[in-house]
Image (tube, rainbow, N blue to C red):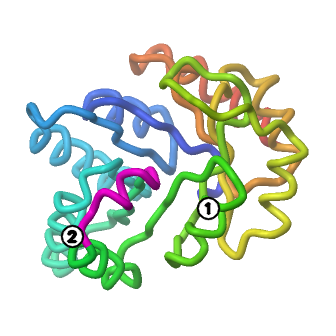
Amino acid sequence: PPQDRLYGILSDGDQVTAALQAGLLCVQLRHKQKQDLTRHLDQSLQAANTAQAQLFINDHWQEALSLLRTVHRSNQTGSNSKIGLHLGQEDLLALTPVQQDHLLAHREQIMLGLSSHSLWELARAAGCGASLIACGPVQPTTTKDMPWLAQGTDNLGWWIRHSPAPVVAIGGLLTPADVARFAAMQPAALCVVRGLGLTLAEMQQTIPPLRQAVL
């Protein structure tokens, strides 16, 4: 888990770069389109390497494995990046058995985050050997359509006590007060999306109070 227990989720390479420049130690590139994906991946990797930060790639598992190989080749020249992959369980289940085996064969080299919204999804994520498990949405969110009820502090606390892997809280964490409420349950990290802002100037304003709220 990141030392400050903040996990920023950004939609493009510019936002990832800004978040890292503003001081985040763990970020996720959640870029849903294939358009310009390579540019956003390369930009995010370069920024993560400069910041010596953890970079997760959302959904694009083949590209994440390719980045992992790039990092391994760069280790001879001092690369500091740590690469992770985050998948929703519907994305994991959409893979063929061969693709699943290929992906899970790399879980010793790449951190694997899996989303979970219910007890059976928590069990499935644990069975896949996830490096971290996201519990959410902990509060109502408009970032994406959610058929799930908000987990709240009680369910998050249950997830944390029973999960064999570190649990991160996600969904509806917009303000320092939101973060403080769920940080009290002691998750490994708290994921912030819209609450970070979009630009470096905004993130320089939002990240310090969010970090303080975790303490």
Is residue 4 among the parts visible in the rendering? no
Query: Residue 67 at what x, y percent from top left?
Result: 19, 63
Placement of 43 over or under 88, stated as above or below: above
Asked if residue 93 lies in the magenta stretch, the reply is yes
Q: Would you say 32 lies left or right of 6 here?
A: left
Q: Residue at x 51, y 38 (%)?
A: 8
Disc 2 marks which amino acid? Answer: Val
Asked if residue 31 lies in the magenta stretch, the reply is no
Question: How many discs mark residues in the rendered view?
Answer: 2
Query: Residue 98 at what x, y percent from top left?
Result: 21, 78
Distance from disc 1 to disc 2, alpha carbons, whole Å, reads 20 Å
Kindly identify which numbered label has been placed on residue 71: 2
Query: Residue 96 at what x, y percent from top left?
Result: 24, 68
- Camera-side residue of 6 and 107: 107
Classify mark 2: residues with Cα within 10 Å, few (<14), some (14-19) or many (20+). Answer: many
Q: Residue at x 84, y 48 (%)?
A: 155
Disc 1 marks which amino acid? Answer: Pro
Kindly identify which numbered label has been placed on residue 64: none
Magenta segment, principal secondary structure? helix
Q: Which residues are magenta?
A: 88-96
Kindly identify which numbered label has been placed on residue 1: 1
Q: Residue at x 35, y 38 (%)?
A: 30
